[in-house]
Image: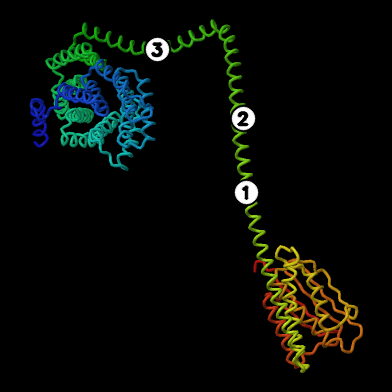
Amino acid sequence: MKKIATIFFLVFFAKKAWCQTSKYLFNIDSAITYYKIKYNNAIAKKDATQIFNNGIKLISNYLNVPDYTAAKKQIAFLKTITKNKNSDNYFILLSSIADVEKLELNYQVALNDYLKAYNYFEKSGNLNLFFKSSVDLAEFFRRTTNFPNATEYIIKAQRIFDKNKITDTAQIIRFYNRYAAIYSEKGLHDSSLIFSKKGLALALKTNNYYSIGVAYNEIGFSYKNLKNTDSSIKYLKISEQLFNNIGAKRESVSAAINFLLAETHSKNKPFYLKQSIKKAEFLITTIKKENLKIQFSVLYFLIMANYQVLGDSLNYYKYKSICFNIKEDELLRENAAKINEIQEKYENEKLTKEIEATKNRFEFEIEKSKSQKKQFFLVLISLVALLLLLGIIFYLYFQKRKAYKLLSEKNKFLQSLIQEIHHRVKNNLQFISSLIGMQSRALDSEKEIKVLSETLRRIEAMALVHEMLYTKNNEGFIIINAYLHQLVNSILKMHNISSSTIKFQINNASFKLSPSQAIALGMICSELISNSVKYAFQNNSNFEILIQFNKNTEGSYEFLYEDNGENFSAKNDSENKLGLRLIDIFSRQLKGNYNIKKQRGFYFNLIFEPENAKH
């Protein structure tokens, strides 16, 4: 009862709604008048946006009549104000052009335009227009019975709808109705009813009367396929009346065809069959007169079948002949398309042969000219690229040279500062040495003089490093060979021993050390040599000291000191103890490990890492 009440309400609503001034857009003719007023006002105000938007609305309503001439005229004008071929408006207009081509059965042109719009809106980020383009392609492939492609694009539209907030309500309704139509064509009538009812609910809510008619047509068609004839007839009748009232002639006739097919299948009595024949003939006449671009061959087959049931052999064979002619025409159209393709190919080949001689002559000249232009262009590009490259190279060269010069000046300045620092440190140490020397000369105690002499020797070992850094360009490093030789001579001089008295042998000491490591090693070496001179050679006239400095395969340094004096013994005097303590301290500073052995003389071995080595 609820369904029947709803149906009667809609029939009543459809008959009365067009009269209501508040529902100005119910009737298509009224809508056209409404948008023409807005369109003309926009032209008067020179409002390009409103001119375009209302122009598109007019095209849509013209196609619903249908009035192809008015639609094409409107398209021609909008083309004149849509110059930017990389804009939303250009591809919105292209979609409208595709709609016209589709309804006029120019499918190849329509598909090309739909695909261009789809590809643009996919990249543009306008989700509403991308959604509409997906539905456009789904409907196009449904109309041309390419159901796999129709399904593919309607699913793409559904993904856009599910993941994004689509605000165009009219396109959402259209999406539901096209989904229902595709499901219906695939035989999924229950699913078709679900989407049709979703579209119907939204169309009723927004007073979209055209979409209400579409939804009822789809519902009626689904019920027809589900063998629910009564429901099918009721919904299709509502759809036909609604389309008729709003002035949508093409949709009204399509709904009438579906209604007639459903009614004929349910009523096989002669009276109803004759009524069905009259209605079918009327619809055929209307389609031809109004140029509605609707496939009506099914009506001829319906008339033929009805005459067969009525036993009217004459009319049966008459319409059977018409049906055969229709089939033949369809085959001829298909064959004609193929023949035209073959003929076009043949004529092209023929024309190609006729102009081949002339074409070859001109082609040679054109290719020669193109080749010369190309060569000139390539040479020009190469020269420009070369000039740019040279410019970049010179720029980078002068920048690098400038930076190098600046860096060199800074390095020289820093080097001079460092040398100045070493010079002052060396001077200060010499000054301290002089003070200590003056103090020792003023003392009478031999023990005190000895202590100051040892202090003086240690200061001299440190001062020698700073002197070498100041006087020689060693890039901040000390050549250990030269340093040890000077250090040995300095210590012997301090002990008043001639260099010929003691035989020194320094091997493999051409390595470089940092100043801090050189000072530490110098202090150790100074203590060892001083200890040998004072204690090891008292009862030995053939003095020998061996110093070796090697680099191991692991990268560490090995320092070896050996003399042939008396066996080493740790005496209890405080000076000797201080010397051993200093050796230990500076060995630790070098982060090294050392060994002292008692054998035929004194043996000292130290292994440490270079200062820049990774520990």
Q: Which residue is mark 3?
A: 335
In the displayed structure, 438 sits above or below 178; it is below
User: In the image, which is nearer the foreground, mark 2 or mark 1?
Assistant: 1
Instruction: Pick whichever, 419 or 85, lies toward us.
Output: 419
Image: 439 above or below 552: below
Label count reads 3
* 2 and 1 marks in contact (CB < 8 Å): no
First in residue order: circle 3 vs circle 1: 3
Q: Nearer the viewer, residue 613 or 392?
A: 392
Residue 170 occupies which quadrant of the picture? top left
Quadrant location, the C terminus: bottom right
Residue bearing mark 1: 402
What residue is pinned by disc 2? 383
Residue at the location (54% across, 5% down)?
354
Which numbered disc, 2 or 3, marks the residue closer to the eye?
2
Q: Residues within 10 Å of mark 3 (few under 14, many from 20)?
A: few
Please, what is the three-letter code of the amino acid marked with disc 3? Asn
Q: 10 Å neighbourhood of mark 2: few (<14), some, or many (≥20)?
A: few
Residue 204 in the figure: left or right of residue 189: left
Disc with the residue nearer the chain's start (2 vs 1): 2
Against 474, is 123 above or below? above
- At x 58%, y 20%, the residue is 373
Image position of 447 (left or right of 589): right
- Work out how far the residue at label 2 is from the one at label 3, CA to CA, in angstroms: 58 Å
- Toward which corner of the image does residue 199 lie, by quadrant? top left
How far apart are the alpha carbons under marks 2 and 1?
28 Å
Residue 358 point in image, percent of width and height: 56, 6
Q: Can residue 266 be seen here?
A: no
In the foreground, 488 or 284: 488
| Residue nearest the viewer, comparing 342 with 418 | 418
Name the residue at 31% across, 42% down: 164
Location of residue 392 by image quarter:
top right
